[in-house]
Amino acid sequence: MSTREVILGVGGGIAAYKSCDLLRRLQDQGFGVTVIPTPASLNFVGSATWEALSGRPVTTSVWEKVDEVRHVSLGSSSDFIVVAPGTADLIARIAHGRADDLLTNTILASSAPKLIVPAMHPAMWSNPATVANVQILRDRGFFVMEPDHGRLTGKDVGVGRFPETSRILAEFNSIANPVHDLIGRKVLVTAGGTREPLDPIRFIGNRSSGKQGYALARAAARRGADVTLILANSELPDPSGVSCIRVSTAQEMFEKVDQAFDGCDLLVMSAAVADAKPLHVSQSKIKKGALTSIELAANPDIVSTVSSRKKNQVVIAFAAETSLDIEEGKRKLLSKSADILFLNDVAGSEIFGSDQNQGVILISDKAQSVQEINVDRTDKDTLADLLLDQALHRLG
Ligand code: CTP
């Protein structure tokens, strides 16, 4: 096959008509595009339009052209699948492995990278059912874009609008033509929150979900790096293509980072590490009458300890503050001998467990001055790439 093949799956939303432009732009880039609409989407854009634009036959059911076994032949011959628009129903069906039309059968039968471009009413996008379905897909390696904010079909305004074609193409191209600028680099990422046991039942912990570090590990692996992720107490599955070490306490994390640091090029310290642990860990449950105070002992400051002996390594630290105090961020950046620090404002706890982040990237230079880059609310994957771009710049 000379051209690369894309399947454009079209869901039953009004934004289906905007996918006509996406189809054209994909063809302009030299891709062969086969359109698979869901039956519902034909209420918005009919098969004739898709056949005329794509120059290819269009079917929606496995019961058409049965002799061709189209879901298998299309699934195995495609290089990419783009679902645009992805409606709440279509996202739910894909997330749950349903195979009730040609598009969902083909998605199940294909191992190609898949990009979903959601478009729906804001209340449907933020509904916990949709949020959970999107998370299932992301955890399985699907790329799911964030919809745009703006005017919807009715009078409502919010997050749920079909993104501009240019933004979809930029996302598609980063998947179709991945950048491998971290090949040969060893990247060590910590993520999650440590837990410091008090007795067999209780611990001192924090609210970190591990998602930002997880996104960094996945992004670095996608960009060709040899990645080790040291993950503390996260429910996230091991990311594919990454060697994942599970730990629980700050001391365990410290030992793993300490062993691996000298051999790495980049350390990303995104874990939320407990600064202190109970001095005594009881082997049996402490009864409530005895639980009146907890004596603490300091944990090692992992990033400061290893950074103090760095040679050519680049170190990215994080600072979660309840107010965006730039001076405090700068102080931490310099005092921890880090090169880059992402300062985020976690007041109101909207960041923990969310797929979004916002804050300021602080970059130190040799003269101990600090450059600031503001990052408006964005998904954790995009922030991961921004931080890796800065690290790469520093690595040279
Ligand atoms: N960190 C670390 N070891 C610790 C505590 C924190 O390596 N024992 C790292 C974190 O992973 C993060 C950076 O240091 O990259 C900043 O963490 P933060 O909790 O914001 O800073 P602290 O030094 O703990 O300062 P404070 O809690 O007083 O704000």
Image (tube, rainbow, N blue to C red):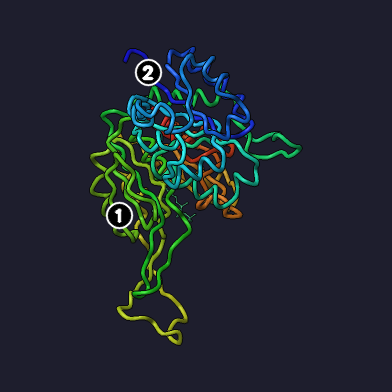
Location of the N terminus by quadrant is: top left
Q: How far apart in space, not on screen, are marks 2 and 1 (Cα)? A: 39 Å
User: In the picture, residue 313 is in which quadrant?
Assistant: top left
> Is residue 334 among the parts visible in the rendering?
no
Relative to 5, does residue 194 appear above or below in the rendering?
below
The one nearer the camera, 223 or 167, is 167
* Furthest residue toward right: 155
* Quarter the C terminus occupies: top left
> In this view of the protein, which residue sits in the foreground, 176 or 206?
176
Tell me residue 2's x, y (percent): 33, 12
**Residue 166 point in image, percent of width and height:** 56, 22
Left or right? Give the position of 201 relative to 11.
left
Element type where label 1 sits in the image: strand
Residue indicated by mark 1:
246
Residue under numbered circle 2:
4
Q: Who's the residue at 38% across and 38% down the image? A: 108
